[in-house]
Image (cartoon, helix red, strand yellow):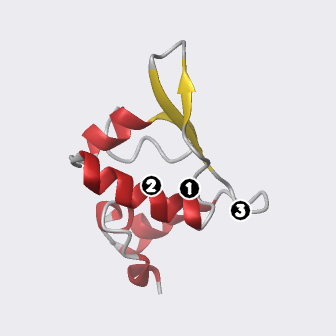
Amino acid sequence: MSKGVFLCQKEKLDEVKDLLNLKNKQMEKHLDILIKYKFLDEPEESYEYRGYISNFNQVDGWPMWKDIKEYCKKKSIVLYSVVYDLNFKLLD
């Protein structure tokens, strides 16, 4: 998985954690925020994968993560800053 590939479907959370180079506590903090605001479903254990997966949500059918990625590209905003730092102010 490369940067910018995820953010749509069910994802293996340890791959997301590794991709963003997060420590366990950082990942937990980010997951709590994303779950609280319903951007991410509660993680579930996958017996096929032997790890945890979650679904990055669309808001009322709106593919928000895809639009954020496209907007960042158009405005030359570093997507990593929005996703990793959860710095949504960059989108204003």
**How many C-alpha atoms fall within 10 Å of the one at disc 1: few (<14), some, or many (≥20)?**
some
Q: Quadrant of residue 54?
A: top right
Residue located farthest toward the bottom when viewing the structure as drawn: 92
Q: Of callouts 1 and 2, which one flags the residue occurring earlier in the amino acid sequence?
A: 2
Q: Quadrant of residue 88?
A: bottom left
Instruction: Work out whether 86 lies above or below 91.
Output: above
Between marks 3 and 2, how big is the CA–CA gap? 17 Å
Residue at the spot 38% in from the left edge and 47% down from the top edge = 4
Q: Quadrant of the N terminus?
A: top left
Res. 12 mark: none
Q: Quadrant of residue 81?
A: bottom left
**How many C-alpha atoms fall within 10 Å of the one at disc 3: few (<14), some, or many (≥20)?**
few
Cβ atoms at labels 3 and 2 below 8 Å apart? no
Q: Is residue 69 left or right of residue 25?
A: right
Between marks 1 and 2, how big is the CA–CA gap? 19 Å
Amino acid beneath label 1: Lys
Residue at the spot 30% in from the left edge and 60% down from the top edge = 80
Between marks 3 and 1, how big is the CA–CA gap? 11 Å
Residue 60 location (% of width, % of height): 78, 62
Residue located farthest toward the top when viewing the structure as drawn: 48
The residue tagged 2 is 31
The residue tagged 3 is 59
Q: Of callouts 3 and 1, which one flags the residue occurring earlier in the amino acid sequence?
A: 3
The residue tagged 1 is 66
Residue 5 location (% of width, % of height): 42, 41
| Element type at mark 2 | helix
